[in-house]
Image (spheres, coloured by chain):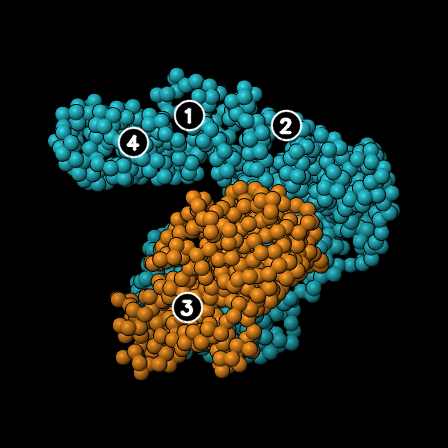
Chain colours: A orange, B cyan
């Protein structure tokens, strides 16, 4: 058995990190240790970071999100960030312990000078001494950096191995996958200069404030408003943007992305991205602090069907570590129409096999060093829906359906926008904001009444 | 073995030990299994004190491995915080246990970071007894930090001072480096005493040579660099100051200090600045310049001011680098505080920097996006399933007025056309949501109880029969309170209930009676706009379509109340031509026989009377509040209390049902504001969250404003919570864009409230600044010009006045509009260098 591979056996599993030595910033440069993914301890990159202070601040921000629980902060989270080496791009990603904040730092071609020697995704060790050393990084001299151990470290593997066992909750995996599906519907909403961004972020309410506010462009800056208007971006639990602070000094612009909203819209997720020209740091916030991405249910409809899974297998085999996935090229290579390629990519997103970059408005190839897909397939709502469908609890009547679950009777109704409404308490509570309920999923599973409906 | 377990329950440690002493190893193991079963059985018992000690003795004396013992003693129900370790160690020695150290490290692993004191002293005593190095997990280190100031009761008498304890602490060397690593541990360190005991003791040990001074200093700097919550950084900052680094020590750590100066939280940056400045010219100019650029954009004014003077001094000392330093100083010219901007610019110019002066373009008016008309009401509910979904989503979660109207409208239509399907679909939902009838005399005029009653009646015909009497009672009671005529009618005693409760309960009683009808066309009062307003033409069409079907009195009354104010003769003629009573009523309303305008009066009220000798709530009430009292004009009856707002003392007379007010009278926002004003004021005076979020709704409504709306906006600007201030800003901008904002009046109220000490003025600066950024500069300037006279005339102008003066100067300059500010000249004439006078001078020069 290869030692570096994580062991995901059940929904709530334990992740074992095994680094050959701790990551450190030495005289020779930044040395980030890896484990898991394509090999036990893969090596992705060796070269120089052209903007070391900014890269250090960005890496610290990603690590801060990884070890924070923004909602109910009882104990710090413990999962390490992951790094993806793709063609001409290094991406560091992390996901908060409360499953409500997703952070990613993309080192763009201008940000490094060297070669991405390997492709793949792996965990990266960020320990307290490294955090302190990163906080000290200053100046403008390029900094040598390596992602993954060099041959010397591998060959002289001695007692310095760092091994950590941390819980890997199913909801964390589901949330990580869910973000990719949700952000795929985002559009750029505003772009403001760094000076204005600093002032704006500074005046936001602090960590304990959970109110849902909206931001709209006003002059050169953003203004808070209490209600959604077209072009507004939701900002819920503004204290969760704290991780952006460190990079503000190096940034040129703050860009904000979000889905389309109209008056009366409920809270929605949003992405806040700082761009220094050489790298980008983005934080994606869940619609409300107490809502983890894991329960947003955006991927459930795709997972309820079978045909998408086959397309996803086909498309997944064609991905080749491009920094952005070209839908048209994939369509040509796979022989599928564009929309089915997009659906397949969304499906791959839920399995953790692609990520979505709002700045490029495209997917990128990344294979999580965990089995994320299984967790999402085991989503409680999907499991419940499968049971209902198998028991023949669904009775379809045109656009409506009746679902019998035990003693209770629920009515599921198809809405003009293609989603379903239900009379169950779950739907009543969320009204479609967190995806379909299990009754609606069960109805969509028996879409062809001849198969299971009887 | 029953006496063994009895002794265990009594917590009789000697008895437990004496039983154990008489047992050989196999018997002990057998007893161990019984012990585990015993503890499992008593699952509702909390083991603490002597009982926990006895249990630990028994466990160590009987169980076979450290794992089993740790599992037993690590249970959440076993609290080892005051367990006595001595007999436990003795029992282990007597039995010849070899795994005591293993047990201790396993217990340490099980400790929780959020209650690290739990079992720490016990575990530590085992470790000391075995003389092994301590575990270094986060929770154990945090427990160590706690133990520095918290000693168990029995040790406290002979507890030595912290310094002596630390000097001989066997854990000191192993755990000290971790003290700087574990996140949040500073908060554990600073509890107890003045919070500085640990920093003092560590410094003393460094003086003695027991600890390495350089290691301490590096540990502190590392902690500060990695950052933490401000409270958790405080003891480390104190340790830094007590260590008082020498110039040599600082010089070798300049980079770390510069990073702290640029990026760390305020107090840390201030310390770094002071320390660096203390070593004089050891800091390289380039490195300092880079950090200084970052400092000059920070919001902490003291930090920026000190940085400016440092750079100024440096420029004098180093004439060769003067130009470079002047360029850095110029970076401060963008600071948000005007006085710092001026200072930075003046210093930059003194050292030879020639800034490019941008010419501000003057725009005399507001630049606001055109007001958006209020959204249309969502389409009516047309099918049973949709109605049931709405009911299911809204029951128990509050009913916004628009959703309530939509459901009621759908209910009367579907109940009279599709009764059976409605019953079949609605009853399971009501059962799942546990909607029940609540029959109590108090509940008769409760809107939500009556709403549930109507829903139940729609779902179960039997339920309808039982409620009929109550509906009839409500309607007969409200018969004397019908809306019209306004003039020349017998006066009725003032209503004891709020107008929303009267109107909605009467309407719901009517709707209950109406459910039996046939082909009901729906409510006349169903809004056509999201604010609740009804388009007069739509109401005319509804009446025309009604034909000779019955008109429900309260439905029509509510529909008329939702019409916009104003006369429409053409439509009135058409309505009169219908020839029906309802048509005539509409015609009369449209011709001006509408809701009269009340007489409004601004009053400042005091607190309610003190109740009893101990009245906790009284002391927390604001001392004064300015409200608007309204009365119906002479000769007008007000049976529903729509036009009457009494001047209630603070803390009295809250009715509830506030959320229904705007949609009850969507064309009379000034009147609604008078009803809601005491509640809005609570956002500013009693720190209530989301009490001012009604203001944008009022801004969307129509009708004249008046003093109540202006006062509500003034209170909202000073609300405690961001969400309320943001809502007020929205309302302000919407009103300004529509030309409905009386900015000088809002300002005058703001100034008066602040001068009277009713509100915290400093809170108003941010929303007003945002209003300028959003394009409302003229409105803001007029508002400020209205507020300043009262502020400047106060014996001591309230805190925050200088900020408003700055903003006033900016907006006056940007608009070029001259408004006389009474009292400004007097303040300028006072002279001196206080901020108030400086900013007053700035405004005066902007106006000249």
| Residue under the image location 21 percent in, 22 percent down | B14
Badge 1 is on which residue? B170
> Which disc is residue A339 wearing?
none
Q: Quadrant of residue B99?
A: top left
Residue of label 2: B245
Where is residue B542 drawn, in percent x and y? 52, 76
Same chain? Circles 4 and 1: yes
Label pair 2/4, CB-CB below 8 angstroms:
no
| Rendered-image quadrant of the N terminus of chain B | top left
Name the subunit of mark 3.
A
Q: Which residue is disc 4 drawn over?
A: B100
Q: Earlier in the sequence, mark 2 or mark 1?
A: 1
Image location of residue B16, percent across then percent down = 19, 26
Q: Quadrant of residue B535?
A: bottom right
Residue at position x 66%, y 39% in the image: B255
Residue B38 located left or right of residue B533: left
**Residue A51: x %, y % from top left:** 66, 53
In this orientation, which residue lies closer to the viewer: B637 or B831? Answer: B831
Query: Which one is in front, A348 or A305?
Result: A348
- Using the numbered discs, state the Cα–Cα distance from disc 2 to disc 1 in whole angstroms: 27 Å
Q: Are marks 2 and 3 in contact (CB under 8 Å)?
A: no
Q: Are marks 1 and 3 on the same chain?
A: no
Which of the two discs, 3 and 4, sits closer to the camera?
4
Q: Compare residues B169 and A300 and report the one nearer the observer.
A: B169
Gap in Å between the C-alphas at discs 2 and 4?
Answer: 43 Å
Q: Which residue is mark 3?
A: A300
């Amino acid at each position: 058995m290869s030692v570096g591979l994580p062991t995901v056996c059940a929904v709530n599993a334990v992740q074992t990190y095994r680094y050959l030595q701790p990551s450190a910033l030495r005289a020779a440069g930044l040395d980030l240790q890896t484990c898991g993914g394509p090999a036990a301890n893969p090596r992705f990159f060796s070269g120089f970071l052209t903007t070391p202070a900014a890269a250090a601040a960005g890496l610290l921000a990603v690590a801060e999100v990884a070890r924070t629980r923004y909602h109910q902060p009882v104990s710090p989270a413990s999962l390490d960030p992951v790094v993806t080496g793709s063609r001409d791009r290094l991406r560091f990603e992390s996901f908060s312990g409360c499953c409500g904040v997703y952070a990613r730092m993309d080192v763009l071609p201008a940000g490094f000078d060297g070669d991405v020697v390997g492709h793949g995704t792996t965990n990266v060790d960020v320990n307290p001494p490294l955090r302190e050393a990163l906080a000290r990084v200053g100046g403008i001299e390029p900094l040598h950096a390596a992602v993954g151990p060099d041959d010397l470290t591998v060959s002289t593997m001695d007692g310095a191995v760092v091994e950590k066992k941390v819980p890997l909750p199913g909801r964390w995996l589901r949330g990580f996958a869910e973000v990719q599906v949700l952000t795929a519907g985002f559009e750029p909403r505003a772009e403001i200069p760094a000076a204005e961004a600093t002032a704006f972020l500074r005046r936001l309410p602090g960590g304990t404030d959970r109110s849902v506010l909206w931001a709209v462009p006003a002059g050169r800056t953003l203004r808070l408003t209490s209600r959604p208007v077209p072009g507004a971006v939701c900002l819920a639990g503004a204290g969760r943007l704290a991780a952006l602070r460190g990079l503000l000094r190096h940034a040129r612009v703050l860009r904000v992305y979000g889905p389309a909203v109209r008056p009366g819209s409920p809270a929605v997720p949003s992405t806040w991205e700082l761009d220094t020209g050489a790298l980008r740091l983005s934080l994606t916030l869940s619609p409300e602090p107490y809502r983890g991405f894991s329960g947003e249910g955006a991927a459930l409809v795709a997972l309820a069907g079978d045909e998408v899974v086959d397309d996803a297998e086909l498309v997944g085999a064609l991905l080749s570590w491009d920094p952005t996935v070209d839908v048209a090229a994939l369509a040509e290579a796979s022989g599928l129409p564009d929309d089915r390629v997009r659906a397949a990519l969304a499906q791959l997103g839920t399995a953790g096999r692609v990520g979505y970059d709002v700045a490029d408005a495209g997917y990128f190839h990344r294979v999580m060093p965990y089995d994320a897909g299984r967790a999402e397939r085991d989503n409680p709502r999907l499991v419940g829906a499968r049971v209902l469908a198998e028991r023949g609890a669904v009775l379809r009547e045109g656009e409506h359906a009746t679902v019998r679950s035990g003693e209770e009777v629920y009515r599921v109704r198809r809405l003009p926008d293609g989603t379903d409404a239900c009379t169950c308490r779950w739907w009543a509570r969320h009204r479609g904001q967190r995806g379909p309920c299990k009754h609606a999923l069960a109805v969509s599973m028996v879409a062809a009444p001849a198969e299971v409906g009887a | 073995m029953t006496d063994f377990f009895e002794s265990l329950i009594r917590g009789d440690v000697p008895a437990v030990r004496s039983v154990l002493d008489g047992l050989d190893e196999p018997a002990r193991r057998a007893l161990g299994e019984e012990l585990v079963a015993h503890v499992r059985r008593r699952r509702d018992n909390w083991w603490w004190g002597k009982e926990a000690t006895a249990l630990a003795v028994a466990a160590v004396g009987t169980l076979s491995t450290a794992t089993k013992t740790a599992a037993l003693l690590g249970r959440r129900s076993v609290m080892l915080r005051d367990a006595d370790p001595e007999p436990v160690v003795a029992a282990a020695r007597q039995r010849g246990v070899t795994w005591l150290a293993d047990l201790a490290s396993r217990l340490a692993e099980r400790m929780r970071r959020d209650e690290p004191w739990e079992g720490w002293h016990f575990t530590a005593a085992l470790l000391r007894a075995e003389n092994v190095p301590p575990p270094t997990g986060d929770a154990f280190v945090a427990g160590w930090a706690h133990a520095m100031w918290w000693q168990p009761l029995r040790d406290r008498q002979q507890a030595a001072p912290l310094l002596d304890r630390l000097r001989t602490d066997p854990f000191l060397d192993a755990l000290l480096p971790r003290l700087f690593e574990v996140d949040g541990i500073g908060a554990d360190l600073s509890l107890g005493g003045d919070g500085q005991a640990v920093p003092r003791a560590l410094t003393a040990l460094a003086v003695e040579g027991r600890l390495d001074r350089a290691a301490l200093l590096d540990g502190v700097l590392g902690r500060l660099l990695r950052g933490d919550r401000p409270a958790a950084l405080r003891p480390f900052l104190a340790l830094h100051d007590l260590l008082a680094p020498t110039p040599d020590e600082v010089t070798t750590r300049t980079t770390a200090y510069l990073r702290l100066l640029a990026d760390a939280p305020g107090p840390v940056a201030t310390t770094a600045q002071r320390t660096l400045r203390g070593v004089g010219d050891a800091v390289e100019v380039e490195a300092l310049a880079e950090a200084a650029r970052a400092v000059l954009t920070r919001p902490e004014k003291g930090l920026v001011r000190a940085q400016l003077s440092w750079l100024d001094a440096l420029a004098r000392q180093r004439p060769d680098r003067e130009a470079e330093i002047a360029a850095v100083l110029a970076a401060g010219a963008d600071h948000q505080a005007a006085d710092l901007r001026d200072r930075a610019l003046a210093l930059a110019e003194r050292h030879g920097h020639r800034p490019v002066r941008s010419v501000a373009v003057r725009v005399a008016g507001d630049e606001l996006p055109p007001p958006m008309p209020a959204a249309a009401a969502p389409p009516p509910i047309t099918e049973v399933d949709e109605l049931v979904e709405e009911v299911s989503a809204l029951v128990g979660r509050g009913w916004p007025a628009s959703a309530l109207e939509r459901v009621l409208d759908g209910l009367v239509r579907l109940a009279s056309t599709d009764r059976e399907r409605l019953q079949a679909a609605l009853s399971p939902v009501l059962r799942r949501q546990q909607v029940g009838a609540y029959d109590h005399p108090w509940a008769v005029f409760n809107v939500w109880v009556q709403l549930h009653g109507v829903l139940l009646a729609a779902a179960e015909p039997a339920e309808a029969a039982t409620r009929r009497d109550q509906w009839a009672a409500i309607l007969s009671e409200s018969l004397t309170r019908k809306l019209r005529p306004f003039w020349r009618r017998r006066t009725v005693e003032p209503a004891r209930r709020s107008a929303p409760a009267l109107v909605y309960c009467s309407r719901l009683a009517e709707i209950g009676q109406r459910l039996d009808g046939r082909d009901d066309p729906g409510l006349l009062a169903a809004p056509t706009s999201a604010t609740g307003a009804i388009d007069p033409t739509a109401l005319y069409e509804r009446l025309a379509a009604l034909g000779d079907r019955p008109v429900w009195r309260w439905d029509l009354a509510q529909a008329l109340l939702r019409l916009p104010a104003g006369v429409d003769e053409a439509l009135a003629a058409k309505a009169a031509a219908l020839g029906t009573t309802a048509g005539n009523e509409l015609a009369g309303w449209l011709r001006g026989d509408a809701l009269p305008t009340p007489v409004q009066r601004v009053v400042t009220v005091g607190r309610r009377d003190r109740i009893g000798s101990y009245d906790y709530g009284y002391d927390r009430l604001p001392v004064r509040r300015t409200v608007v009292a309204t009365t119906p004009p002479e000769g007008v009856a007000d049976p529903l209390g729509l036009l009457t707002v009494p001047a209630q003392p603070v803390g009295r007379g809250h009715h509830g049902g506030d959320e229904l007010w705007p949609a009850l009278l969507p064309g009379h926002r000034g009147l609604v504001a008078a009803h809601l004003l005491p509640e809005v004021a609570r956002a500013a005076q009693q720190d209530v969250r989301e009490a001012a979020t009604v203001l944008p709704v009022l801004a969307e409504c129509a009708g004249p404003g008046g003093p109540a709306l202006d006062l509500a906006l003034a209170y909202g600007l000073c609300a405690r919570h961001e969400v309320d201030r943001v809502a007020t800003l929205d309302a302000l901008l919407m009103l300004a864009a529509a030309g409905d904002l009386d900015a000088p009046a809002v300002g005058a109220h703001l100034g008066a409230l602040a001068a009277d000490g009713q509100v915290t003025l400093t809170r108003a600066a941010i929303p007003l600044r945002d209003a300028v950024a959003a394009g409302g500069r003229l409105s803001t300037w007029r508002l400020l010009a209205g507020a300043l006279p009262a502020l400047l005339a106060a014996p001591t102008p309230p805190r925050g006045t200088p900020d408003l003066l700055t903003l006033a100067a900016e907006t006056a300059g940007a608009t070029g509009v001259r408004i006389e500010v009474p009292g400004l000249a007097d303040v300028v004439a006072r002279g001196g260098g206080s901020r108030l006078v400086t900013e007053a001078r700035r405004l005066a020069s902007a106006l000249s």
